[in-house]
Amino acid sequence: GDNVYRYIRPEQYKNDPSHGRFDIPHAVVYLGYEFGKGWRMQSEIEFEHGGAGSAVEQEFEEAGEWESEVERGGEVELEQFWLEKTFMPQLNLRVGHIVVPVGLNNSHHEPLNFFTVYRPEGENTILPSTWHETGISLWGNAGDWRYEAQFLAGLDAFMFSRDNWIGKGHKSPFEFKVANKYAVAGRIDNTSIPGLRLGISGYFGQSLHNTLPHDMEGNNAQGQPKTYSKYKGEVAIGSFDFTYNDYNWIIRGNFDYGTLADADIISQLKRNLAANNAPYDKTHVGKAAMATGIEAGYDIFSFCDKLRADDQKFYVFGRYEYYDSYKPAKDMGDYPFSDRHRMAVGVNWMPIPQIVVKGEFSKRFLKSQYNDEPSISIGIAYQGFFN
């Protein structure tokens, strides 16, 4: 069920009718151009849920109130738009709107890089997905190593939430991205072991005062420091992930942990904005969040010489993940339904390498006072790159 009170009065909705959805979660168009002499550009335009403009949603934290939601660009997002200069394989400079490669999902977000019908739920809940910011990136390859270092516009603390932690912090309700605060991100991958890729990534930046109007720091008219000047809302994230692809197995895993300084102050300020209808999230935000998951699939078509020669694959997979989008700061209320385990089993049939038909049964396991949430999903995904 998806009743807005299912976490507030779970006993009343134990046998609530199920709900079905037909959707196109992501449709992406890549356009790039090689200028020559080491210069190239790349763009990525994503259409989410097959639409653009505004949407109406029911907010259960507001007692089921219906609200009209308008985001910058509606449901059409420019996820990449950058210019790059290659000096050598070990050194490349990229400037513009770029993907932030923190976590397994953001660094490998194309639909053939995960078994589930939807993107892996844990990372997709607590982190922006796909995470994209305007900034500068240095990256390169040296033997079995790949690195990337980025300088970026910071996140907006007022877009953080109880249900998604910093997941919507990269968005802006305005026609521009406010950037009074900045951040750095980095990633290192190693492929020394055949079939195995290991990666670590991280992010650090300030998030408070990165909003409009910029009126909560500095000095007031009397030259005295304003009340909230000392609070910065630093976001720190560390992530480890891996992918193994050999002997007809694909195994992927991730562990992400992040902290948010001054979460209690941010939560207080966000609630104070409710009276003036500011376009920000009004729920509390946790001082920390985490997500971990592992999935494994085996290609059973590998036993058939004819199917293997035809380059068809049929993976039977299982996935487990645990995530919590809200770990409360001291003296802040707790919301135990944010703490979830999820298990999924399913299949991926690839009639050709660029197309996959997916099916899965999954179940979320919540704390004992809530109802578990089973689901069945069927999807098709495909990707192709043209040079």
Image (tube, grey):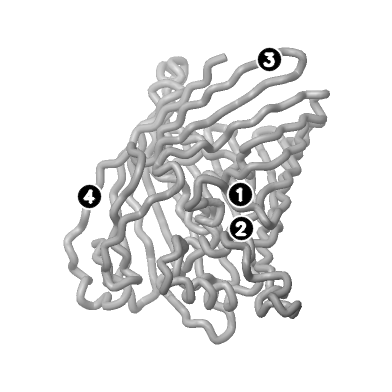
Which mark sits nearer the N-terminus, 3 or 4? 4
Which mark sits nearer the N-terminus, 3 or 2? 3
Q: Are dots 2 and 1 in contact, CB under 8 Å?
A: yes
User: Where's residue 18, x and y in %?
Assistant: 20, 58
Q: Are dots 3 and 2 in contact, CB under 8 Å?
A: no
Within-10-Å neighbours for mark 2: few <14, some 14–19, many 20+: many
Q: Residue at x 76, y 39 (%)?
A: 147
Which of the two discs, 3 and 1, sits closer to the camera? Answer: 3
Look at the picture and state if 327 lies above or below 297. below
Which mark sits nearer the N-terminus, 3 or 1? 3
Residue wearing tag 4: 20
Q: Distance between the residues labelled 1 and 4?
A: 30 Å
Tell me the kind of residue under disc 1.
Answer: Gly
Quarter residue 156 falls in? bottom right
Residue wearing tag 2: 256
Considering depth in this image, is 148 or 135 the residue closer to the camera?
135
Q: Are dots 2 and 4 in contact, CB under 8 Å?
A: no
Which numbered marker is on residue 273? none
Residue wearing tag 3: 35
Considering depth in this image, is 98 or 294 the residue closer to the camera?
98
Report if residue 258 is visible in the image.
Answer: no
Tell me the kind of residue under disc 2.
Answer: Asp
Which mark sits nearer the N-terminus, 2 or 4? 4
Left or right: 358, with 221 as reference point: left
Within-10-Å neighbours for mark 4: few <14, some 14–19, many 20+: few
Which numbered marker is on residue 103? 1
User: Where's residue 35, x and y in %?
Assistant: 68, 14
- Regarding mark 3 in the picture, which secondary structure is present there? strand
Q: How far apart are marks 3 and 4 (CA)?
A: 47 Å
Quarter residue 194 falls in? top right
Q: Are dots 3 and 4 in contact, CB under 8 Å?
A: no
Report if residue 114 is visible in the image.
Answer: yes
